[in-house]
Amino acid sequence: MGTLWLLAAALAVGCGDTRQTEACRVYVDCIQALDLVQGRSTDLARFEAEGACWGGTTEGRDACDRACDQGLTWLQAHQEPLPEDCR
Amino acid sequence: MRALLPLLALARPAAGHVPAVLEGELRVEDPTISQALYGCFETGREIYVVTLPMPRDFALPFELLVPHRASLREHRPRYAVAGPGLPLPTPDEAAALPWDLPAGWGAMVELDDATERAVIFEGFSRRVMWTTEPIALALAEGEHEVWIWSPEGTTGDFVLGFGVEEDFSGVDWGDMLSDWPSYGW
């Protein structure tokens, strides 16, 4: 029975973490705050919690995580004014 | 050629980017679909221009890759994503651009000047690559351009990758196989 529970748990979890990363959560919040200031409505679907970034390979997930981190760092260095959600 | 088919079958889910050969200027009709554009600096003086007509405000990642080979150790192409609504570059970044920015445009300028270059395994071409590291950019609706140049005049291959969403419905697999030497160096 213990083996079955382990198998069920493994199947439920899958082979990789499919949760949105903290870097992308912050990046999404930042762009949404910028959109309010700039009157835009950016399609952020791929980076959001149910986005394409989190449904595929581990490599894809890692790439999205690094992209969000780099994107946020770049905004912090270049965007004026910078919304509080981006700091 | 037949030997390549299983390789492509493996490559598609691993990479997800629709591949194309980049020669001179290219207009990507649907930049919301992920792309991998394979180019080469033959003289080191080329400036590649990729036009992205964004159909709506849209955030996507960009990345520039160079094959990890001893002969390309000094080959460090730069790229910039330029368009309306982006922040202005710093004076150093603006000075590095191959051209002045059009009025009303800003740019993300990737100087690729890190001492240690990051390395990844690129799934489609099954090659180890140096990478500038991906960066997510929120682009406003309207035309944007990606400029790619070789600041030191070095020659060699590169790949511009952007986007996340996959859509292989428009891919001509015959063309892809005939272009394979451009992808799988």
Image (tube, coloured by chain):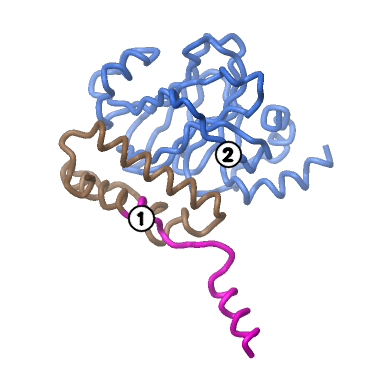
Label 1 sits on a secondary structure element that is: helix
Amino acid type, callout 2: Ile
Q: Which mark is residue A22?
A: 1
Q: Residues within 10 Å of mark 2 (few under 14, many from 20)?
A: some
Q: Same chain, marks 1 and 2?
A: no
Q: Is residue A3 magenta?
A: yes
Amino acid type, callout 1: Glu
Q: Range of the magenta residues?
A: A1-25
Q: Residues within 10 Å of mark 1 (few under 14, many from 20)?
A: few
- Magenta span dominant secondary structure: helix
Quadrant of the image containing the N terminus of chain B? top right
Q: Position of residue B176 (x, y in %)?
A: 69, 36
- Determine the image quadrant of residue B146: top left
Q: Using residue A35 as the reference point, say whether residue B36 is left or right of it.
A: right
Query: Residue drawn 50% across and 11% down?
Result: B152
Residue that lies at the very extreme toward the front in this rendered image: B115
- Determine the image quadrant of residue B53: top left
